[in-house]
Image (tube, rainbow, N blue to C red):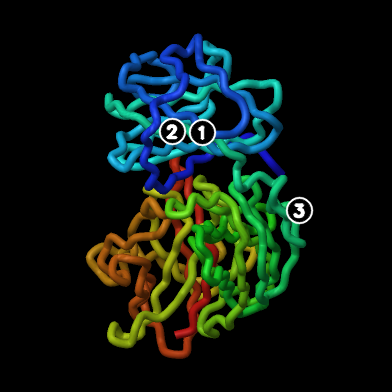
């Protein structure tokens, strides 16, 4: 599905301009009319400030009309000793409210991608100096390399939303097409006691990878790949979302990619319950998982929690029993039962209190985590007694939500 869109792209240089500037206007109301594709030399050495559109000074204006409907790329190319320009696209005629897009890029060269330009409608192109600088360059207008007219969708389309995700099985998938206007979604079943790994062999662009529940709740995120550890005792269907991000070295906003999806076995000492849990105020489901640190650090069990609301505090809970349905409490589900303890005993190894950072990862502020992250449960239990080798204990994270509410992560059973 295609939506109106303006995207920032960055350009390479090496063009040395020797021509004098072509026709150009210093006045928005009398912008120079141009149409179609091509290049337009410019100089703002004698331009004045309009105070309109994108931030910048000494600005120039063109009124551009597209030759056919589609996506168009507006680039600014300078001599090697370039000044920093600001490039903007505004609705025409002059005085129309709004700005369609700006590239304010100090110390870099830039352009704008205009999608779904319509025949019969004109657009104001504005070039100005960033921070009061002046100079010369060239405005270059071309068809966008990512216009779908010139690209063919892959065989798994149309899979642009969580609801329309294409069902796949673990394996290798080649030559899949993606653009900033055309994300990809795939549904996959994670077998019991396995994890999910998504990889992109040899990709040239940055891909943001997200794992969703089938209802669209964010379960995990990654860049250029993802490892999600549900550690579930039953099969679990999730949706993998792939979105392209502008690659500043290649200007890509579309392209083809290869993807491998695998479900490697999960360690048998961990088993999740109440998964996925309720979405929190950040729109994500807080996820609790277990792993062991390196042998040189004792090969101890570490509990990690992420996808919580940034800036909110919480702590770990432990119990002798669990319920896979739980009971409603606050905004979430308490899934622990039996004898329950709270790891918030100040001044001891039984204090796990911390906060979720800006990346939504739980950071331990009590000195009982793994380099400040997560929580290493001690053998002593907060409700009395000790954990013995071979025993299974059940954990969950309680955390505060804004406005005084609270929530919970999924639960995790751990065999020591």
- Work out whether residue 181 can be spotted: yes
Determine whether the residue tagged by mark 3 lies in a helix, strand or loop: loop
- Work out whether residue 328 can be spotted: no
Q: Locate residue 255: give its quadrant.
A: bottom right
- Determine the CA span between mark 2 and mark 1: 6 Å
Q: In this image, 12 relative to 141: left or right?
A: left
- Give residue 138's mark: 2
Q: Say which residue label 3 marks.
A: 158
Disc 2 to disc 3: CB gap under 8 Å: no
Q: In this image, 362 relative to 178: left or right?
A: left
Specify few, some or many for label 2: CA neighbours under 10 Å numbering under 14, 14-19, or 20 or more.
Answer: many
Specify few, some or many for label 3: CA neighbours under 10 Å numbering under 14, 14-19, or 20 or more.
Answer: some
Determine whether the residue tagged by mark 2 lies in a helix, strand or loop: strand
At x 36% / y 69%, what residue is drawn? Answer: 375
Q: Nearer the viewer, mark 1 or mark 3?
A: 1
Camera-nearest residue between 146 and 273: 146
Disc 2 to disc 1: CB gap under 8 Å: yes
In the rendered image, the quadrant that contains the C terminus is bottom left
Question: Where residue 293 sits in the image (x, y, percent)?
Answer: 36, 80
Question: Where residue 229 sits in the image (x, y, percent)?
Answer: 54, 71
- Determine the CA span between mark 2 and mark 3: 39 Å
């Amino acid at each position: 599905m295609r939506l109106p869109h303006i995207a920032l792209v960055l350009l390479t240089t090496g063009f040395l301009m020797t021509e004098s500037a072509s026709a150009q206007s210093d006045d928005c109301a009398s912008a120079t009319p141009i149409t179609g594709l091509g290049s337009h030399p410019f100089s703002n050495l004698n331009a004045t400030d309009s105070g309109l559109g994108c931030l910048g000074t000494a600005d120039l204006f063109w009124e551009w009309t597209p030759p056919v409907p589609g996506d168009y790329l507006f680039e600014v190319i300078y001599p090697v000793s370039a000044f920093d320009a600001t490039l903007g696209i505004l609705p025409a005629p002059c005085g129309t409210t709004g700005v369609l897009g700006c590239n304010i890029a100090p110390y870099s060269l830039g352009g704008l991608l205009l999608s779904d330009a319509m025949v019969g409608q004109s657009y104001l192109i504005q070039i100005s100096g960033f921070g009061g600088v002046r100079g010369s360059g060239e405005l270059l207008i071309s068809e966008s390399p990512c216009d779908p007219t010139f690209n063919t969708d892959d065989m798994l389309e149309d899979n642009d939303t969580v609801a329309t995700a294409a069902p796949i099985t673990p394996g290798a998938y080649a030559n899949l097409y993606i653009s900033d206007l055309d994300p990809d979604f795939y549904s996959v079943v994670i077998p019991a006691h396995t994890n999910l790994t998504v990889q992109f062999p040899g990709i040239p662009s940055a891909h943001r990878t997200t794992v969703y529940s089938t209802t669209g709740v964010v379960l995990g995120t990654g860049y250029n790949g993802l490892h999600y550890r549900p550690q579930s005792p039953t099969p679990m269907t999730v949706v993998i979302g792939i979105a392209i991000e502008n690659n500043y070295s290649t200007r890509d906003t579309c392209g083809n990619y290869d993807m491998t999806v695998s479900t490697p076995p999960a360690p048998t000492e961990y088993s999740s319950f109440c998964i996925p849990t309720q979405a929190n105020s950040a729109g994500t489901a807080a996820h609790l998982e277990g792993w062991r640190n390196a042998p040189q650090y004792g090969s101890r069990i570490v509990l990690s929690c992420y996808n919580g609301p940034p800036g909110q505090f919480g702590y770990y809970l432990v119990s002798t029993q669990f319920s896979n349905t739980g009971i409603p409490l606050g905004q979430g589900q308490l899934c622990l039962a039996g004898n329950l303890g709270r790891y918030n005993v100040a001044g001891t190894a039984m204090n796990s209190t911390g906060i979720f950072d800006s990346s939504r990862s739980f950071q331990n502020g009590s000195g009982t985590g793994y380099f400040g992250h997560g929580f290493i449960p001690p053998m002593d239990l907060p409700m009395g007694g000790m954990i013995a080798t071979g025993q299974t204990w059940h954990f969950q994270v309680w955390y505060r939500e804004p406005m005084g509410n609270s929530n919970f992560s999924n639960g995790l059973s751990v065999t020591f």
